[in-house]
Image (cartoon, rainbow, N blue to C red):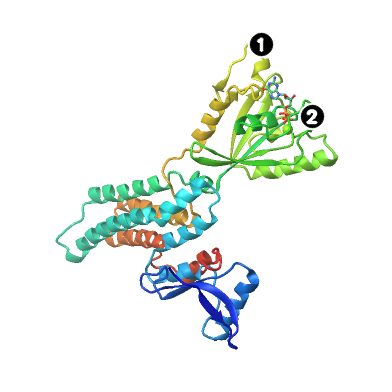
Amino acid sequence: MQKPATILDPAGEIVEKALVVFHPGPGSYTGEDVAEISCHGNPLLVDAVMGVIGATGLARTADRGEFTKRAYLSGKMDLAQAEAVGALINAESTCGIGMARSLLAGDLSRRITGLGDELLGIISGVEASFLTDDEAYDAASLSREVGAVIREIDSLLAHGDSAPKRYSGVVTTIAGLPNAGKSSLFNAILGYPRAIVHQESGTTRDIIREHLVFSGVDFLFHDTAGIRETASGPEQAGIQKTMDILRQSHLVLYVVDACRGLTREDEPWLNLGDKTIVVMNKADLLPRPSYGLQGEKVWASAKYRTGIDELMDAVADLFPLGQPGVFLGRHTFLLSRAREHLAHCLDALDDGMTPDVLVLDLRTALETLREISGDSVGRDVLDRIFSDFCIGK
Ligand SMILES: Nc1nc2c(ncn2[C@@H]2O[C@H](COP(=O)(O)OP(=O)(O)O)[C@@H](O)[C@H]2O)c(=O)[nH]1
Ligand SMILES: [Mg+2]
């Protein structure tokens, strides 16, 4: 059992009794010798302990992300894994935590290293042909090999659009004209009466937000005020909030009273989010009710909870769980750039360019890929990445 250490100030007064653990390098997080002090959480005590340490003149406070940056610089992890630490800390969804963990475990790094090795093999083959003269490269097999690397990159980028949303949670907004049944649908999806439902128009004014994990993906559902152009006062303020959240939405469930059908009044509000599903609600009131996906629309009754499972299946289809996918912008950007250089190499091959020209594209593609794991990145890039971290990580 570890005994608490007594921390004294320069005058010999007791400042705090704390648990101090020594992590010797190179086995520690940063690879260097590290001492970890666990004291009571009162910020005044923490300041006092920090004051004693600072007074020695031997220490300073760490910069944002400095521990992880040092771990990266001493080769304990590559840059993509270091970014995963930040992604893990900032994840707000269960799915996001899983994605960050996979990145931290090196799943992406391994695939990138594999791609780099393949490219290096291709480059050496082409270089050998113009260095030794006796070994001409085979254009058909070069094109096949480069094509295979491009396909592998495409598979990594396949979920490039939905992966960042799965990481942060899919912002989903229920919108529509007053009284269409938005709050009823919100409650039916959540499975309990969260929002007030009333036959009077203009009942919902503030946005109500609830988190729901469905089919392994986190959705952030928002119930909103009904939209109409003639509103005034608090109702108008509610509509403004609706407009703001609509524009940030990854998915909009646009609710329509099926008895009225889609009218010209609805048109300006459709397609404001990235994706829209039109929900024809109150289908129970139709002379011949039918439910589920028909064409582009889902028919449902929020009041009697029919057609809701079919609606949620349609929602899940738009954001498949799939592979973890590349979810950080820097990785998507670098993969796309590497792909461009490889596509350019294939064009140059078709145009009968000489091997030295082809090698230029291949090398640039390789260097671009290596930036993901942090080989050959500049100080500015490192500073930008670690400045997103909090102090102490
Ligand atoms: N018959 C029927 N009535 C519904 C349905 N959904 C909502 N309503 C009724 O429509 C009225 C308005 O519902 P509400 O959810 O408050 O609509 P909102 O203004 O769009 O949020 C209420 O009286 C609800 O009971 C439905 O699927 N069928
Ligand atoms: Mg409502």
Labelled disc at residue 287: 1
Q: In terms of image quadrants, where is residue 375?
A: bottom left
| 162 sits left or right of 184 in the view | left
Whether label 2 lies within 8 Å of ligand 1 gets the answer: yes
Percent x, y of residue 220: 60, 42
| Amino acid beneath label 1 | Pro
| Amino acid beneath label 2 | Ser
Along the viewing direction, whichever of 341 and 256 lies nearer the viewer: 256
Whether label 1 lies within 8 Å of ligand 1 gets the answer: no
From where the camera sits, is residue 291 visible? Answer: yes
Q: Residues within 10 Å of mark 1 (few under 14, many from 20)?
A: few
Along the viewing direction, whichever of 154 and 341 lies nearer the viewer: 154
Labelled disc at residue 201: 2
Residue shown at 34% from the left, 53% from the top: 111
Along the viewing direction, whichever of 276 and 151 lies nearer the viewer: 276
Residue shown at 82% from the left, 34% from the top: 230
From where the camera sits, is residue 335 visible? Answer: no
Along the viewing direction, whichever of 70 and 109 lies nearer the viewer: 70
Locate the N terminus and report the quarter of the image it occupies. bottom left
Residue shown at 78% from the left, 33% from the top: 203
Percent x, y of residue 312: 55, 31
**Position above or below: 60 against 240:** below
Callouts 2 and 1 close, C-beta under 8 Å: no
Residue at the extreme left: 134
Percent x, y of residue 219: 57, 41
Quadrant holding ligand 1? top right
